[in-house]
Amino acid sequence: MKLAELAKFTFSKGLSNIQPTRDDVLIRYGVSSYSDKDYMFGSVLNYGNVIKLSSNKLNCNLLFLQKKIPSPEVFLNFNDIRNEDLPVLRRLKYHSRGSDIKRIDNLSSVVHGDYYSKFIDSKCEYRILVFDGKAIRVQLKVKSEDNQGSDYIHNYENGFLLKDNFAHDVELENKLIAMSERAVATVGLDFGAVDILVSKDNEPYVLEVNSAPRLNKYGRQLFTIYLYRKLGREVNLNDFSRIKVNEGRNSTGLPVEFREIIINR
């Protein structure tokens, strides 16, 4: 709603009462209902059927593995898990905010789930926002000082915050950017936020693609700029107070065209 207000778009929670014309543009933000109406619009960003795929975490994980995009190993049946595979994470096909995740360290009792994924001992996790095939923001998930939640579920509910300003590892981040752009294209989304886990031996794994990522004020301004450009609207950067252009250490975020990647030593 805040994004629509900033961009001066019409916001709607659903399409049940919408009668589109061929001049209308539909921008779906994580909502897949009434996907049959998509074809009545002049154009669509993030088709409903594609959002349905991205929402099915199991199918997405399997798709990434099929397409050779590094992703955690998947076990479809609890009985297929061996002791040497432990620990694993119990998962559900549909979930949000990591509410489905349960770590399994032994096979003495069955923990029911839709599937199970190999636990990756990580050193960090990134979120990369991709729009129209291009990464426009790179954030690092950082544990807050008062974190009381899980150390391996890196989300807001577990005390992790998304940071734009951090010591950038350019070589690693270039690899993550390429993986993120490929993951979003593989799913078929026009935009999405990719969560990538980096293991302690520096190997990246795509976890999921979010079709409705959390955006702060800076993120909403950045996203609006790219939406305007996609739709052929004029963009005046002076209208976006939080976008800083090549201001060195005072820069924020990682829209590559606005600033250089800053390495803090």
Image: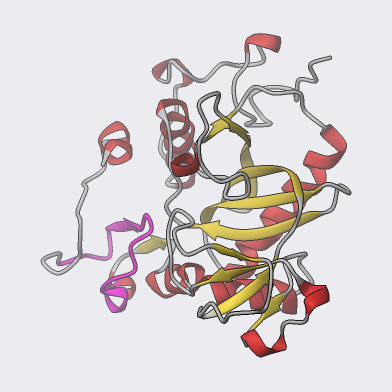
Considering only vertical position in the picture, is 207 above or below 114?
above
Q: Which percent across, then down, holds residue 38?
A: 32, 71
Q: Quadrant of the C terminus?
A: top right
Residue 65 in percent (x, y) is at 73, 75
What stretch of residues is rendered in magenta? 19-37
Of 181 and 162, nearer the camera is 162
Quadrant of the frame with the N terminus = top left
Q: How many marks?
A: 0
- Magenta stretch secondary structure, dominant: loop
Q: Nearer the viewer, residue 45 or 12?
A: 12
Q: Is residue 260 above or below residue 138?
A: above
Identify the residue shown where x is 27% and y is 65%.
22
Residue at the location (42% across, 46% down)? 231
Above or below, 157 relative to 13: above
Q: Which residue is nearer to you in this view: 182 or 240?
A: 182
Q: Position of residue 216 (x, y in %)?
A: 42, 31
The picture places residue 112, in percent across and down from the top left corner, at 50, 80
175 vs 208, left or right, is: right
Determine the image quadrant of residue 59: bottom right
Q: Residue at x 30, y 79 (%)?
A: 36
